Image (cartoon, rainbow, N blue to C red):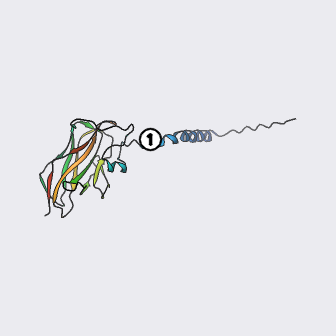
Amino acid sequence: MILRLVVVITLPAAEVIAMRALHLLLCLVPLMPHLALCYPDYVPQSACDWLAPWHEPYTDPAEGPAPYKLRIYHSQAPAGIPVPVSVVGSQPFLGFMVQAHDAGSGQAVGSWQVTPHIPATTMTCSNPDNTVTHNSRVSKQLVPLAWLPPKGYNGTVFFKGTVVATYTTYWTDIASAPFRVVSV
């Protein structure tokens, strides 16, 4: 004769809710890598290599002229003094990433300064704060920025960047007119 013993355990409601939450979390864990590839509020470090978004599904940049510009306001600037530059669009955009490049070497130079009321943040690609990018998914048409040339620098510089209109539509290699930085 086999004797069966059945034990019924009743859990308080709070423990049942906790167990269900844990079960839901365990079901979502496999999706985490996909969720981590969406970057509405910042740009991942891996974007430094391409100055392009890393959104799934991976799409090529839009073709044709970009409806966005990197606007500069001077043809010459003194080294060590902030240079105003703006990301400007004829239509709204969600994200951007901009660097200043030495026209001779192509290397990113200088650093960016951001203030709390501007939807931007700096990131370090090859040098500290040498890249500026969005920090908000809010739609925008104008983002005023300030780039700081290195002290003692003499050379020709241009701004280069990417602007993201929608999750899968973006333009790369947007460049400003070149301008001269002179040591004072």
Q: Residue furthest left?
A: 75
Tell me the residue at 18%/46% (across/down).
176
Q: Residue furthest front?
A: 105
Tell me the residue at 28%/52% (across/down).
131
Quarter-of-image position of residue 82? bottom left
- Residue 48, percent from left and from top: 32, 50
- Residue 128, percent from left and from top: 30, 58
Q: Is residue 101 left or right of residue 41?
A: left
Q: Residues within 10 Å of mark 1 (few under 14, many from 20)?
A: few
In the rendered image, which residue does mark 1 sit on? 35
Question: Number of callouts in the render?
Answer: 1
* Image quadrant where one finds the C terminus: bottom left
Q: Is residue 130 above or below residue 20?
A: below
Residue closest to the eye, 109 or 140: 109
Residue closest to the eye, 176 or 86: 176
- Residue 168, percent from left and from top: 33, 36
Give the amino acid type for the residue marked by disc 1 in the picture: Leu
Q: Secondary structure at mark 1?
A: helix
Quarter-of-image position of residue 180? bottom left
* Image quadrant where one finds the N terminus: top right
Q: Is residue 93 left or right of residue 74?
A: right
